Amino acid sequence: MDRITKAARLMIVSDLDHTMVDHHDPENMSLLRFNALWESNYRHDSLLVFSTGRSPTLYKQLRKEKPMLTPDITIMSVGTEITYGSSMLPDDGWVKILNQKWDRNVVIEETSKFPELTLQAETEQRPHKVSFYVDKTKAQVVMKELSSRLEKRGLDVKLIYSGGMDLDVLPQGAGKGQALSYLLNKLKTEGTLPVNTLACGDSGNDAELFSIPDVYGVMVSNAQEELLQWHAENAKGNPNIIHAKERCAAGIIEAIGHFNLGSNTSPRDVADFVECKLDHVNPGYEVVKFYLFYERWRRGEAANCETYIASLKASCDPTATFVFPTGVEKTLHECIYAMKGCYGDQKGKQFRVWVDRVLSTPTGSNTWLVKFDKWELSGDERCCCVTTAKINAKGSGGASDGYTWVSVQQKWLEGYEKKDTSIWLF
C-alpha cells in the first residue's frame, strides 16, 4: 500500500473461484491475459484486491496451483478478514468492528441443533465465520429458523448462501460488501479514494459487492443463477453493472473496456511487439513484453527470424550484464545468443512465463530501477526469481522511444528454486 501515495487510478475488487480463476481453463489463459494487462498497465498506479470466500489456508493453496498475481489487499473468509500486502498484515480495526454482537460459541451451539447442516472442513472455520453445507432444497427453511434462534440469543448475524450448497454464518457487519465499504471509507479518510472501482463476481456471496454506491460491477458470463436472480430483482436497470459475454478474467478485461476504465488490450493479445507502437509506455510494459516474447520463443510461437533477435539486442546496452541466481554473470547479448539455440524447445509442452509485483522506481530523469518476480512454469515444476533490472529510456525522446536494458540480477525465491539451472536463460 505504501507505493500508492495518491488516489489509485483503478481499484479492481475480484472474487477468485470462477471469477478471476477459471477452473475449466487448464491453460489458465484468461488469468495470464489479465496478469499481463495488470502488470504492464495498472500495477504502478492502481490497486488489486482479491475478495474470496476461501480461508487463508485454502487461499494460499490456490496460489500454489494457479498463476495468480500478488494483490495489494486480500479479503478472505467471505469478508471477515482483511489483510495487506504480500506479508498479509491483518487490519485490526476491522476485527474490532466484527466483534460487536458476535459470539462464536453460541453460533456453534445453535447450529448443532440442525441435522440438515454439515460443518465444512476445519480450515474453513474462522474467528468470525462458521461454515456449513446444506442441501439447496432445505436451505431457505433452515436459514429462516436459524436466524430467528440466533436473534433470540442476542446475536446480530448474517447468513449467506452461495454455490447452491455453502452456508456461512457471519457477524451482521461482515461480508464482502461491508469489507469493501470499510476499505473505501478508510481510503477516503486517508485522501486516497480510488478514481474508479470495479467489482467482479460470479456467485451469491458477491452480490453485496454490486450494492456499493459509485462502484462499477461485472458479473462474468459464467455467473451462477443465484447472482443473476439477485441482479434481476435488485439492479436490472443499473447501467453500472453488466453481465459480461466473456468467462472469468476475460470478463473482467471486457468490463474495463466497457466502462472505459483504461486500456483493456493485454500484451498477450498483441501478435507482434516489433510492429506494435504504444502512445504510453512504462517500464512495467517493457518487462512484460520481454518475458512474453521469451515464452513465445521457447514455445515456437514467434517466428524464428533474425529481425526479432536484432530487436532484442537493440533493446540491450552492449555492455549490459545478467547475473544468474547461481551467481554466474554474462552479458545480455550472450544470453540472447544462447536463446537462439532454444527456439521451440518447449513447443507442445506446458511452459508459461509471467511476472508479478512489477515496481519501477525512477533513479534519474531517464533511468528506472525495476523490481519484479519472474515466474516460470515448465511441466509440473514452478520456479521463481526475485529480479532487479536497471532500464534506461532510449534517445532524447524519453520513454516514448522505448527502453534499453542496462543490467539484470536475479536470486531464487525461497522454495521455488529450479532443479536444473543449465537451461535457465532469463
Image (cartoon, rainbow, N blue to C red):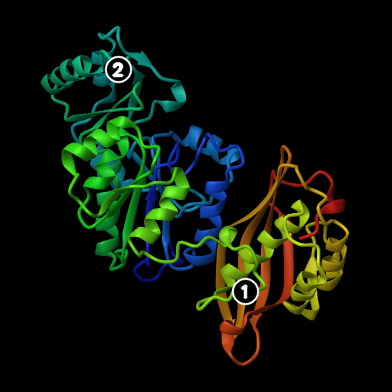
Question: How far is mark 1 from mark 2, CA to CA?
Answer: 54 Å
Quarter of the image for the C terminus: give it: bottom right
Q: What element carries label 2?
A: loop
Residue 160 rendering spot, x and y as whole percentages: 27, 29
x 75%, y 79%: residue: 314
x 44%, y 68%: residue: 45
Q: According to the image, label 1 marks what residue?
A: 369
Residue 388 rendering spot, x and y as whole percentages: 67, 66
Residue 296 rendering spot, x and y as whole percentages: 71, 56
Q: In which quarter of the image is residue 291?
A: bottom right
Q: According to the image, label 2 marks what residue?
A: 136
Q: In this view, does 362 lie to the left or right of 313?
A: left
Query: Does residue 255 lie above or below 15 as drawn?
Result: below
Whether residue 286 can be seen here: yes
Q: Is residue 138 left or right of residue 288?
A: left
Residues at discs 1 and 2 in contact (Cβ within 8 Å): no
Disc 2 crowd rating (10 Å Cα; few below 14, some 14-19, many 20+) is: some
Q: What residue type is labelled 2?
A: Lys
Q: Is mark 1 on a helix, strand or loop?
A: strand
Q: Quadrant of residue 109?
A: top left
Query: Does residue 218 lie above or below 265 as drawn?
Result: above
x 46%, y 67%: residue: 3
